Image (tube, rainbow, N blue to C red):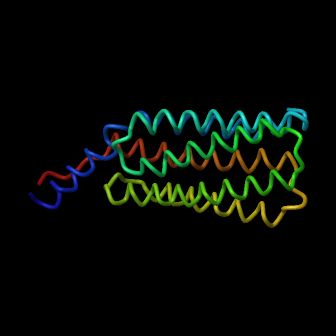
Amino acid sequence: MTGIDTDRSKFWRSSRPYWLQMLAEGIILVVLGWLALFLPFFAPATTLNTIIGWLFVVSGLVGLVTTISGRHGPGFWWSLLSAVLAIAVGSILMEWPSTNSISIAYLLTIFFVIEGIATIMYALDHRRQLSGRWEWMVASGCVDLTLAALVVLGLPTTAPLAVGILVGINLVFGGSAMMAMAIYAHTARFPKS
C-alpha cells in the first residue's frame, strides 16, 4: 500500500463519514454564538446569566448528540469532555442567575481554559487521523485560552455584557472551525496513486 493509499484510508475512516454532523454542529454553534453576542444588548441584566446558561446547555447537548453519533471518529473523548463541560457550566449559570460577577468570572476562566485545552487536543487527534483543517480547531482552542486570559485580566469588573460577548466569540470561533473541518471532510480529494 502506498503512502497516498494509507492517507486515503485513514481519512475515510476518520472524518469523512461524520462530515454532515460536524457541519450541523458548526452551524448551530455559530448561530448560538451570534445570539450570545447580541442578546446582552436586548436582554435585561437580571436574566442574562440564565440566557447564556441556556446557550451553553444547548451547545453542549448538540455537541453531545454529534459526539455520540460519531463516536468512532477522532477526538471522541475530547469532544465528549467539551460537551459535558458546556452542559455543566450552563446548568450552573441557570441555577445562579444573579450571582456576582467575580463568581461568573472564575467559572468562565475555568471553562475557557478546559475548553481551550480540549479543543487543541481534539485538533491533534484529527491531525493524527489526517482529517484536514485541524489547524482551525487549534486556532479556536488558542482563542479560548486568550478569552480565559481576558477574563482574568478584567476579573473584578466583568460585566454581564462582556460575558455574552466572550461566550459569543467562543461559540462563533468553535463553530466556524467545525464547519471548516466538515467542508474539508466532504470535499477533499486525493491524487490517483
Q: Position of residue 49 (x, y in %)?
A: 81, 39
Q: Position of residue 36 (x, y in %)?
A: 73, 39
Q: Which one is in front, 47 or 95?
A: 95
Number of numbered discs visible in the structure rendering: 0
Decide: is 100 above or below 18: below
Residue at point 53%, 56% (across, down): 118
Q: Which one is in front, 70 or 22?
A: 70
Residue at point 67%, 40% (across, down): 33
Q: Position of residue 6 (x, y in %)?
A: 17, 56
Decide: is 121 above or below 174: below
Residue at point 35%, 51% (across, down): 131
Q: Quadrant of residue 158?
A: bottom right
* Quarter occupied by the N terminus: bottom left
**For residue 128, side relative to residue 176 (left or right):** left
**For residue 141, side relative to residue 169 (left or right):** left
* Quarter occupied by the C terminus: bottom left
Decide: is 83 above or below 62: below
**For residue 42, side relative to residue 5 (left or right):** right
**For residue 2, side relative to residue 40 (left or right):** left
Q: Residue furthest left?
A: 1
